[in-house]
Amino acid sequence: METNCNSQRIESLKRSTGMDGLAVQSIGRSGGLALLWRKSVNVTIQSYSHRHIDSSVQETSQSQIWRLAGDFNEILDHNEKKGGSFRPIWQMKDFKNALENNGLHDLGFSGEQFTWSNRQDPPNTVQERLDGRVPQTLGSVVFRKRW
């Protein structure tokens, strides 16, 4: 998930929750990534940068429930964006396919329609629902499918 906080804060969160994980430092006010998991789960980090974390997960039980939370920086439909240039249909379709192929489901949203803004004055305002695949304030996309 995109954290918008420094890696020391994530390390503190790991210690306080007893979880394992990887924290990637934010660059100014942008980014910062974290991947956290229970210590009983076998996770191997394949690669990472300030824009991604690639990992493989060895499940220990078929009944585990996974939760993904964060800012995916992508939309599923044009109604999730107001202003600016149109997102290419192939790009939204690829994102939708990636979610579906991994058993992920859009849980909808509660509250404000858009979760990001470029903070420009009209007519240059752009707003998007980038992290809306999370329920209310906790932010979880749940799936039960094995990879």
Image (tube, rainbow, N blue to C red):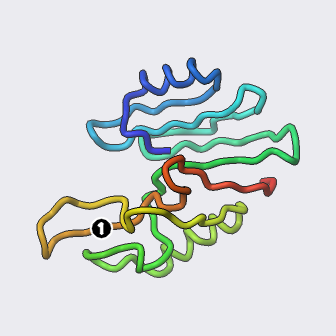
Q: Position of residue 140 (x, y in %)?
A: 59, 51
Relative to residue 27, is residue 136 depicted above or below? below
Relative to residue 100, is residue 140 depicted above or below? above
The amino acid on which the numbered mark 1 sits, given as a three-letter code, is Gln
- Left or right of residue 57, residue 86 in this image: left
Q: Residue at x 67, y 61 (%)?
A: 104
Q: Residue at x 56, y 72 (%)?
A: 94
Q: Position of residue 42 (x, y in %)?
A: 76, 32
Image quarter (top left, top right, bottom left or bottom right) of the C terminus: bottom right
State the residue position of label 1.
Answer: 127
Nearer to us in this view, 31 or 53:
31
Helix or strand or loop: what does disc 1 sit on? strand
Relative to residue 14, is residue 127 depicted above or below? below
Nearer to us in this view, 122 or 22:
122
**Which residue is farthest front?**
111
Q: Residue at x 66, y 33 (%)?
A: 37
Q: Position of residue 101 (x, y in %)?
A: 71, 66
Relative to residue 143, is residue 5 depicted above or below? above
Counting the numbered discs, the total is 1
Q: Position of residue 120 (x, y in %)?
A: 15, 63
Q: Residue at x 37, y 29 (%)?
A: 6
* Crowd class of label 1 (few under 14; some 14 to 19; many from 20; radius 10 Å): some
- Left or right of residue 14, residue 142 in this image: right
Nearer to us in this view, 107 or 93:
107
- Left or right of residue 136, residue 32 in this image: left
